[in-house]
Image (tube, helix red, strand yellow):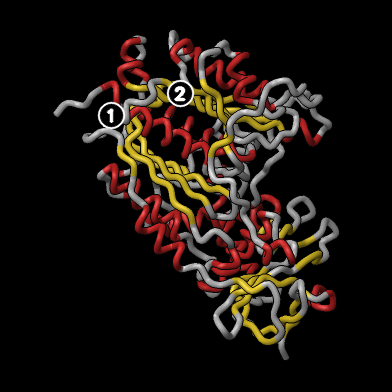
Amino acid sequence: MPLDEARVPVVLSTGQCVDRDPTVSALELAARAAQDCLDAAPGMGPRVQLVSVVNIMSSSTGPAPASVLARELGLNSARAEVTTIGGNSPQWLVSRAAAAISGGDLDVALVVGAEAQHSALLGGPAPAEVSDAPDPVIGDERVGVGPGELSVGLVAPVHVYALFESVIAHRARRSAAEQRVTLGEIMTRFTEVAAAHPIAWFRDVRSATELAAVTADNRLVAEPYPKRMCAFLHVNQGAAVLVTSLAAARAAGVADRAVFCWSGAEATDVWLPSARPDLGSSPGLRLAATAALGAAELGVDEIGAFDVYSCFPCAVEMAVEALGIAGDDGRGLTVTGGLPYFGGPGNNYSLHALATMVDRLRQRGGTGLVSAMGWYATKHAVGIYGASPPPRGWRRGETADGQRAIDASALTVATEADGPAVVVAATAAMGRDGAVSAAPLIARLPDGRQIAAAAEPGELADVAGRELVGASIEVSGNPPRYRRSG
């Protein structure tokens, strides 16, 4: 049966921009990217029914960025909405639009996001005047950590992701220093891609040694991560994609630019990091990727290009494991260069990845997979795209049964304890002076519960460089503190 073109979702056009001017605002960047996107699809502007804006962290946007943006673009009849926090949002929004088009409920949607954290760091533009009613907020509003993590200050993403990395290193029987060397070999390939991307914030190729060596300008942030392995948030970047039906694209005479949405799927890991039975892998990402591939009726070997979320190296390692591919896969793991080198514009990185993937497929053909991640490897969205139509139309991957199994695997979290425990994940966070400023960990109690704990002050000086995963500790107090046993 031929596909109904009115229900075949495509990404018709893209827009991306970068600007190092400290006076530019996130809304200005969003408007530039969106206008470029609309200019690449003549005649589609008046047909836009929905403007979806990815949550903007920059404080100068006001409560109604989508409404303001729609008005500036002349899209006065479009509905406006903004997402909750989460780097999964861009891919989720595109899949959501694709589902609505496939279901006959939508024809044209504009998805936009931007950040101006570079401007904010340097003083930034004046905050926007508040005159519009707040935009409707869509997405999961749950915060990413619970009382256990909060009680010991385990909130900074670099600290939580460093905990995940410690589990991966321990499983591979590598010390933190050895793990850094391995990570340098993975991430150097990301710098090569960023160096060739015109929108990348950093366009320098870095060797594995440069990335792994702890130096004055590559200080250790949280063991085992030095600065050059961490997402770089202080960028000014914007991106937009126009999602339409193939019929709308054909009516506008620009269907030759269409890249097809094949499938999408979403899942979450056990919500709280302290409740996860294995902090070194991502069942949620595996579930979403497997479901998206299954819905597209493709094997991973049939995917021509990947962009996996890369806020920290463990996110890349988790994706490699979830997809069942090698870390040095010849197809590469990124089309942008990743969050540490291309740039990490808040929640919007994956819209750049998606836009770049679309441009690549338009030029080279084939298929591509984009994975997006929110909070602490918590929320996952995966999309598959192709230069040709999917044989059975766009399909959403089913994850309900798998999600119930993941949710059921959550361990009970203790917020206080007095006695022995075994470390399951640990890191040492460093201040700018190179001294250990904190050493949070997650440990397993004898009764099977898990607990987040901070080091007693006397322990800090001896934590750096020590391998704590698997070690016995004593936990006491509220909030919990630990000391090494023996």
* Residue 309 horizontal/vertical position (percent): 52, 47
- C-alpha separation, residue under disc 2 versus residue under disc 1: 21 Å
Of pointers 2 and 1, the one earlier in the residue sequence: 2
| Front tag of 2 and 1 | 2
Camera-side residue: 255 or 70? 70
> Mark 2 falls on what kind of element?
strand
When the figure is inspected, residue 466 is found, relative to residue 309, above or below; the finding is below
In the picture, measured across the screen, residue 114 lies left or right of residue 335, that is right
* Residue at figure coordinates x 83%, y 56% from the top left: 432
Circle 2 crowding by C-alpha within 10 Å: few under 14, some 14–19, many from 20? many
Total labels: the figure holds 2
**Residue to which mark 1 is pinned:** 388
* Residue 37 horizontal/vertical position (percent): 51, 19
Residue 383 in view, yes or no: yes
**Residue furthest front in the image:** 133
Name the amino acid, label 2.
Ala
Based on the displayed image, in which of its 4 quarters is residue 2 positioned?
A: top left
Based on the displayed image, in which of its 4 quarters is residue 12 positioned?
A: top left
> Mark 1 falls on what kind of element?
loop
Circle 1 crowding by C-alpha within 10 Å: few under 14, some 14–19, many from 20? some
Is there CB contact under 8 Å for labels 2 and 1?
A: no
Name the amino acid, label 1.
Ser
* Residue 452 horizontal/vertical position (percent): 67, 70
Camera-side residue: 385 or 446? 446
* Residue at figure coordinates x 36%, y 35% from the top left: 385
**Residue to which mark 2 is pinned:** 109
Residue 198 in view, yes or no: no
* Residue at figure coordinates x 58%, y 61% from the top left: 272
